[in-house]
Amino acid sequence: MSKLKRISIILAMCIGTFMCLVNETIMNVVLPEIQRGLHTNLSSMTWAINAYTIIFAALTIPFGRLAQRIGVNKSFLGGTVVFLAGAIVAAFAPDVNMIILGRSIQALGVAFVFPLSMVIGISSVSEKGRSVVIALLSMTQGLAGALGPTIGGTLSERFNWRWVFIINIPLAIITILLGVFSLNLKEKVVNNKIDIFGSILSALILFSLTLGLVQGNKWGWNSIGIIGLFLTSAVGLIIFIVYERHIDYPMIPMKLFTYRKFNGAALSMLLGTVFFVGVLTVLPTYFVSLQNKSDLTAALLITPASAMIVLFSPISSMLVNKLGGKIAVILAALSMGISYILLWNIDMNNEFHVGITCAILGAGYGIITGAMQTLAASDFQGELLSSSQPVILVMRLVGFALAASIFITALSNNVSTAKNSSIRYAYTQIDNLNLNSKQSNSMKNQVSYRIRHQKNNKDSKYKVSDYQKQLIVSSTLEKVPVQFRNKIKPIIEEKVGHKIQKTENKINLSTTRISNHTKSQFTKAFIDIYKVATPFVFSLVLLSFIFKRRTK
C-alpha cells in the first residue's frame, strides 16, 4: 500500500470518527431553537437525541460482527452513505418526526462507521505504527465529544439550527471520496455463520439498558417501565453469556474477556467516561441557569477540556507501551480527582479558574482514552481485534448514558432540595416584615414562583407607586375633619412617605437576603454533586491493580 493511500485511510477514519461522535452532543445547545422553529414541545425534541444514542449503542456490536461477513471496508463506506442520507433528511426536516427519523438513520450508519474506523485505521499500519494511529483516533474521539456543544452553538448563532445537520453532509462526502480512493473494496471476508440469536439478544440488552438510563429521570427510577428495562437487560446479559460460551460462532468471542489487559481497559474507559461526561453534562447548566450566561458561552467555558484531550490522548497512546496501564490509570485518576476537588473550591465566577479546572479534567480523560484504546487493541489481530473495538465503544457509550442519568438525577434531587429550603427561608423573611395578610400572601406567591421556576429578577426592587401613595394619603385624610384636611395634608403625606420608604427598605433588604440565600442554595446543589463524587473518582486508582506491573 502506498504512503498516500495509507494517509488517506487514516484521514478518512479520523473524519468518520469525528462526525459520529460530534453528533452525540451537537444538538444539546440548539434544542430550544429547533423547538421554536418547528413549533413542537421539548419532550419530542429530546427524542432526536435519545434515538441516536440508543440505536448507536444497541447496534454497534451486531453491526461490527456483520461487517466481518460483508467486508469491513465496504461496510464502512456503506455506513457513511447511510449516515449521509440521515443527515440530509434531518437537515431539511419539515417537522420533529422527520428529524427523529433522520437522526435514527444517522445512528444506523454510525453503528457501522465508528467501530470500523478504529479497526480499519489500525489494520492499515504495521503493529509498530499502531500507537500513532490509535493516538490520532483517540484524540479525534475526545475532541469531537467535547466540541459538539460549541460547534452546535456557533453554527446556530451564525446561521440557523439546520446547519447542525448540514455540516455533516460535506464531512460524509469527503469521507466517502477518501474511502473510495484508498480502501480495498475487493477485500477478503469472513464467511463464518452469523450469530443471529446473539445479535438480537445483544441489541435487546443494550437497547434496554440505554433506554432505561436515558429515561430513568423522566419516567421515575422506581417506575415499572424502568425496572422492567433494567431486569430485561440483566436477564438478557446472563442468557447471552451462557449462550455465547457454548456456540461455535459467537458474536463476541468470550476469549476477549480472558485478557486481563482488555478487561482493565474496558472498565477504565467506562468509569473514566462517566466522570468526564458528568462534568460536561452539569457544568453548562450551572453557567446558564445561575450565572445567566448564553449557551454558547457556557460551551466555550468547558472547551479547555477538549484542548487537553487533544494534547494528552496521543501522548498517552504512545507512552502506554513503555509505562504500562497501571501508571496511566493512576495519573488519570489523580488528574480527574484534583479537578473535582477544584470544582467545589474555586470561584465559579472566575473564568480563568474554571478553564484551568476543565483543562485538568480533560488531561485526565485524555490519558484514559489514549491509553485504554491502545491497551484494548495491543494483543489482538483479525477477529479478536474486530470484536474488541465495538466492545470498547459500547463501554464508552454506556458511560455517556450512565453519566447523564447519575449526574442529572443527582442534580435534579439537589435542586429540588434547594428550592424547598429557599422557599422556607423566603417565607420566614416575609413573615418577619409584618405585612398585612394580602401583601404577605402576594409576596410569598411571587417569590415561590420565581424560586420554583428559577426566574432571576435583576430589577426586583420593591417600590410603591405614586398612585398607591395618594390612595393611602386619601384614605388617611378621610378620618380627618374636612376643615383641617388642607392644613394637615402635607404632614400626612410626609408621614406616609416615611412609612412607605421604611417598608420599601425592609422589603428590599428581605428580597436581597432571599435572593442571596437562593443563589447560595442552588450553587450548593451543583457543588455537592462533585463533593460526593470526588472519592469515587479517586477510587479509579484501584483499577490500576488490574494491570500487571510493566517489566523490561
Image: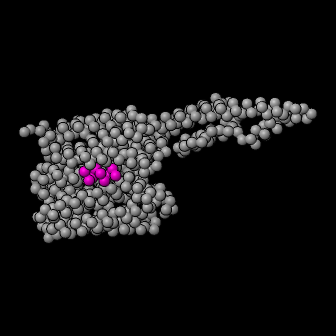
**Residue 328 picture location, percent across and down:** 20, 40
Give residue 197's position: percent from left, percent from top.
Answer: 23, 60
Looking at the image, the residue that sits furthest to the left is 552
Image height check: is 330 above or below 206? above
Could you say which quadrant of the image residue 2 lies in? Answer: bottom left
- 146 within the magenta span: yes
Seen at 92% across and 33% down, the residue is 483
In the picture provided, is 124 more to the left or to the right than 137? left
**Left or right position of 269 against 224:** left
Q: Residue at x 30, y 39 (%)?
A: 360
Figure quadrant of the N terminus: bottom left
Quadrant in which the C terminus is drawn: top left
Nearer to us in this view, 4 or 383: 4
Count the marks. 0
The colouring scheme, among rainbow, by chain, secondary structure or one colour, is one colour
Q: Which residues are magenta?
A: 139-147
In this orientation, does residue 346 appear?
yes
Residue 545 included in the magenta stretch of the image: no
x and y percent of residue 520 in the render?
49, 34
Compared with 94, 361 (above or below) is above
Can the viewer see residue 388 in this picture?
A: no
Q: State the residue in front, 521 or 294.
A: 294
Image spot of residue 306 (x, y percent): 31, 48
Residue located at (16% from left, 44% from top): 319
Q: Main secondary structure of the magenta part?
A: helix
Residue at image position (38%, 63%) is 165
